[in-house]
Image (cartoon, rainbow, N blue to C red):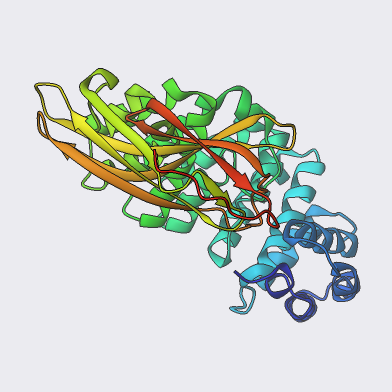
Amino acid sequence: MPTADELISPDSIRRLAVILQEAAPGTSRWETVADSPALLGPLGLSERARTVGDALLADCGRDYEELARAVRRALSRADLTGWMIWPVTEAVAVAATASGTGRHFDDGLDLLARLTPRLTGEFALRTFLNADLDRTLATALTWTDSPDPAVRRLASEGSRPKLPWARQVPALNRDPGVTVPLLDRLYADASQDVRRSVANHLNDLSRLDAGLAAEAAARWLRNPAPTTAALVRHAMRTLVKKGEPAALELVGFHGSGEDLKVVGPLLAETDVPMGGNLVFTARITNVSSRPVSLAVDYVVHHLKANGKPAPKVFKLAKRELAPGESADVTRSHSFRPITTRVYYPGAHAVQLQVNGHRFDMADFQLLKAEEPLVRGSRE
């Protein structure tokens, strides 16, 4: 993935300054924007967007009308596009909400919708949501009828409770149901990008209120488009991992713990070197008199720095089993160092989770990097 310096780069911001100087010279020469690349240094992507956004505000004296006129004139140029748009949307949102004028608030949302096809206005929408949730959501509801899929996506993506890289909107966490009317309008959208946003949004909601998310998905499945089943599967992924019965049923998995006999996990080795692989197999048998459809996951109980275990669920397989039928599964789980997880040597465990039901655990030791490997026996 490109780095922050490659996305909101000094060159792109200098180009933004030139675009504004040529399209809207006005009383400002946009010199603060032109000089702002010197401030970017080691800043991350969000910080870069806000730093350049602050420069834009400084050059227009935080006057919303002057900024809006300049941006609208610059929109006539095709080269106002790409990652330079993010700081522009941030400046528009701050100026529009800080003015205290309802007319500026509404005009700022309109300008955000005009900018979003050039990259996205989803991050800046958070400023509007925090300033006036109801007014912003009412406007977002009108965007669901836009002929432009980028604007329809803005309605869903910008209002996600857990939008990555974005500032929090506490009101969305307190009352997650307020955005469901947007999703009800968009779940059958013709655009795959819009539908993916809806699925991710509903997945966010499932982390806050599982029942609310499952209820929305069930409602959509009662009046589905050809794409709805796939959308629901993606939206329910967190609840399926957690083994929520309603979510499992919605995506087509059925079969209780009493329907199954699980043997394993059987470990190839009980001592695993840091950076090595945990290899295991298991057998699942349908002991019921009816067919079952299974989501087979496995849980690794990692040892944390405080000495306590922390379980994490990983996907393994999907299986359809007739009465009396068995299925064998196997997995090699890597303990290679990664940036998103720190491994600590010591006692760990692994177990199977099938349709949300967890079965027997198998213990193993994760060895220090310098520790010699002592072969363990197969269970």
- Closer to the camera, 154 or 280? 280
Up the image or down, 105 lies above or below 87; here it is: above
Quadrant into which the N terminus falls: bottom right
Q: Quadrant of residue 29?
A: bottom right
Residue 302 visible at all: yes
Left or right? Give the position of 148 relative to 339. Answer: left
Percent x, y for residue 95?
A: 79, 50
Q: Residue furthest top?
A: 258
Residue at 55%, 57% (x, y): give it.
Answer: 276
- Closer to the camera, 246 or 302? 302
Residue at 38%, 32% (x, y): give it.
Answer: 353
**Count the marks: how many?**
0
Percent x, y for residue 32?
A: 90, 70
Q: Quadrant of residue 139?
A: top right
Left or right? Give the position of 150 relative to 220. Answer: right
Up the image or down, 67 lies above or below 165; here it is: below
- Closer to the camera, 252 or 206? 252
Percent x, y for residue 81?
A: 61, 72
Up the image or down, 68 lies above or below 359; here it is: below
Residue at 79%, 53% (x, y): give it.
Answer: 64
Quadrant into which the C terminus falls: top left
Q: Quadrant of residue 28?
A: bottom right
Left or right? Give the position of 139 relative to 107. Answer: left
Residue 146 visible at all: no
Residue at 58%, 42% (x, y): give it.
Answer: 365
Percent x, y for residue 292?
A: 17, 30
